[in-house]
């Protein structure tokens, strides 16, 4: 299984030149890793995609969008279709992020519609799932994660699963006001639940890549990346500058190799 590392810029105010320079520095810093089984994706604000795609096409770094509509086109003011995003240079689409679920009321049905649309249109899809409560029991954790997966994958074509990336992101571990990532024991439990649920509902879990996100940083990335069943990390603030992202990827790969 190939290693996967991604970052979500959310609504950061970055201009086109800064965004291009970020990609150049990231590609230069990662060097041969990008040709050696390491896959990297960046999800900037959608307005930056055309400028960044000019740089990304010279590398193997993938660009993606944080949001999109599940319909092909129509009267959906303010929304972007998969076709528009594809034309702008996106090859990855994110679905089900906690902030979309909580702040914009995206329920399981919306997540399912978006995931089907993204995969049908040939994108790599990052499906975010995670529990809401830090103190949830092991039994409830299994119930919550399994329910999210079953709902999201309803109607998904099995032949598309090789383009699916599941990002386990506990809601309580996301955001600037949170100091800590999920404990390794919780990450390990969740990875087991996710892998087991995938095997039950689709018959296999080997083609689906699983990454962890939620306050990943240089001090914890190595230990988290070493968790069995994980294929990489979804990095937030620690990837705000390319040097930081490169350092996290390098240390995480060391952990995964042990």
Image (cartoon, helix red, strand yellow):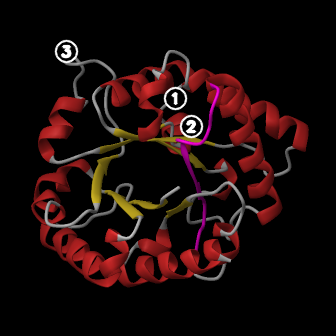
**Are discs 3 and 2 less than 8 Å apart at CB?**
no
State left or right for residue 197 relative to residue 122: right
Q: Position of residue 250 (x, y in %)?
A: 49, 81
Residue bearing mark 3: 74
Main secondary structure along the magenta-highlighted residues: loop
Residue at (61%, 21%) from the top-left corner? 151
The earlier-in-sequence mark between 3 and 1 is 3
Residue 153 in which image quadrant: top right
Q: CA distance from mark 3 to mark 2?
A: 25 Å
Secondary structure state at the residue bearing disc 3: loop
Q: Residue at x 43, y 73 (%)?
A: 239
**Looking at the image, residue 27 lies above or below residue 84:** below
Question: Is the C-beta separation of discs 2 and 1 under 8 Å?
Answer: yes
Marks 3 and 2: which is nearer the front?
3
Report the residue at 56% width, 37% height from top.
102
As for residue 213 lying within the magenta part, the answer is yes
Q: Is residue 250 magenta?
A: no
Question: Which quadrant would the C terminus be assigned to in this image?
Answer: bottom right
The residue carrying pointer 3 sits among few (fewer than 14), some (14 to 19) or many (20 or more) residues within 10 Å by Cα, namely few
**In percent of the image, x 41 and y 23: which residue is there?**
116
Q: Secondary structure at mark 2?
A: helix
Q: Which numbered tag is attached to residue 102?
A: 2
The number of discs equals 3
Query: Which residue, given by chain and number where applicable, does mark 1 sit on?
Result: 105
Span highlighted in magenta in the image: 203-217
Of 150 and 240, which appears nearest the observer? 150
């Amino acid at each position: 299984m190939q290693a996967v590392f991604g970052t979500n810029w959310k609504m950061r105010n970055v201009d086109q030149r800064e965004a291009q320079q970020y990609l150049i520095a990231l590609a230069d810093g990662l060097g041969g890793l990008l040709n050696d089984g390491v896959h990297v994706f960046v999800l900037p604000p959608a307005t930056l995609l055309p400028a960044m795609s000019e740089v990304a096409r010279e590398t193997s770094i993938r660009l993606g969008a944080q949001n999109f509509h599940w319909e092909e086109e129509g009267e959906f003011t303010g929304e972007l279709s998969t076709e528009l995003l594809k034309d702008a240079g996106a090859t990855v689409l994110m679905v089900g992020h906690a902030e979309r679920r909580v702040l914009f009321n995206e329920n399981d049905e919306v997540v399912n519609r978006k995931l089907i649309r993204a995969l049908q249109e040939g994108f790599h899809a990052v499906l975010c799932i995670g529990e809401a409560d830090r103190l949830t029991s092991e039994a409830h954790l299994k119930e919550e994660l399994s329910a999210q997966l079953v709902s999201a994958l309803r109607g998904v074509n099995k032949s598309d699963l090789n383009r699916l990336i599941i990002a386990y992101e506990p809601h309580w571990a996301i955001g600037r006001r949170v100091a800590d990532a999920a404990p390794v024991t919780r990450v390990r439990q969740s990875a087991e639940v996710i892998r087991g649920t995938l095997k039950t509902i689709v018959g296999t879990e080997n083609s689906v890549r699983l990454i962890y996100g939620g306050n990943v940083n240089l001090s914890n990335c190595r230990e988290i990346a070493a968790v069995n069943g994980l294929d990489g990390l979804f990095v937030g603030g620690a990837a705000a500058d390319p040097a930081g992202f490169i350092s996290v990827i390098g240390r995480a790969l060391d952990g995964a190799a042990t």
